[in-house]
Amino acid sequence: MVLGAAIAAFALKGFLVPNHFFDGGVTGISLLIHEMTHANLPLVITAMNIPFIIISYFMVSRNFAFKTLLSVVLLGLFFTFLPDFNITQDKLLISIFGGAFLGIGVGLVMRVGGAIDGIEVLALYTIKKTSFTITEIILGINIFIFACAAVSFGPETGLYSVLTYFTATRTIDYVVEGIQAYSGVTIVSAKSEEVKLGLVEGLGRGITVYKGERGYLPGNFEEREDVDIIFTVITRLELRSLKNLVLEIDPSAFIFVNTLRETDGGILKRIHHH
């Protein structure tokens, strides 16, 4: 949490604030208020997050609210005591590296169960009042922020701020989920027994088998046969090995991959014997 708050403060102090760049969410709103009124940024960020911390206390958990409050306070302290500096004035570098460092900081805080930005809490609260999804609510809020930035500081600043937000968001995903984020893989093959053996014994993965039918082709609808539909969960790093293994057994196998947001239980990792 301390490291995450320090890195986020470094991103704000060294990249975004000196060059009048913006991020999305509560941090972006705080940066807008700071630029327009020259108010103290740490105080603005803290004040803007307080309502969402209170909401999270009742909607999420006491522990999450406490960690979020502590993270926001730490961010303000680091920002206050870091010396003023401007690493670069290149707008593309500011967007990419400023967003990346901010994403690393926010992601590290999220890994320990806190948050620096209360936008997700606002979305959770708003979703109960509307028919919009969390993603749509966050997107709508951020469109408003970037539109204000474009009107107040020029369209170029608004566009670069969108790039900053995108970079930060993608970095958060990698920090929170890690490069070993899990994917669900569905395999339909005429050589299902060999594929199952390869996955279990070769890759060391647990599998689930559904009973299904294959066929139903255009012009040959009546021809069909029973088939085992294999499902397994693997890491992103193992995806290429799995595809190579399956296609080596059956070049005509159908493979479907989808990203999983969360996994729990089952055999997700190999058991290493030392």
Image: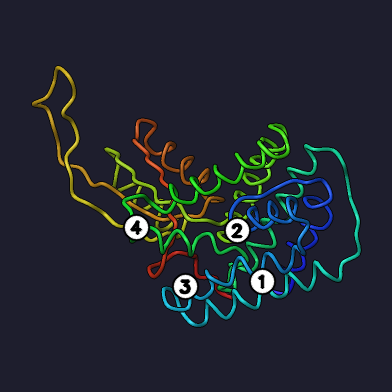
- Real-space CA distance between mark 3 and mark 4, rounded to the nearest whole angstrom: 41 Å
x, y percent for residue 200: 40, 57
- Residue 180: percent from left, percent from top: 56, 57
Q: Tell me the kind of residue under disc 2.
A: Val
Residue type at numbered disc 4: Ile
Contact between labelled residues 1 and 2, with CB atoms less than 8 Å apart: no
- Gap between marks 1 and 4, in whole Å? 43 Å
Quarter of the figure with the C terminus: bottom right
* Apparent side of residue 130 relative to residue 3 in the rendered image (left or right): left
Q: Which residue is mark 1?
A: 72
Mark drawn on residue 141? none
Disc 1 residue crowd, few under 14, some 14–19, many 20+, Cα 10 Å: many
Q: Quadrant of the N terminus?
A: bottom right
CB under 8 Å between callouts 2 and 4?
no
Query: Which residue was labeled with disc 4?
Result: 207
- Label located before the other in sequence (3 or 1): 3
Up-down: is 128 above or below 169? below
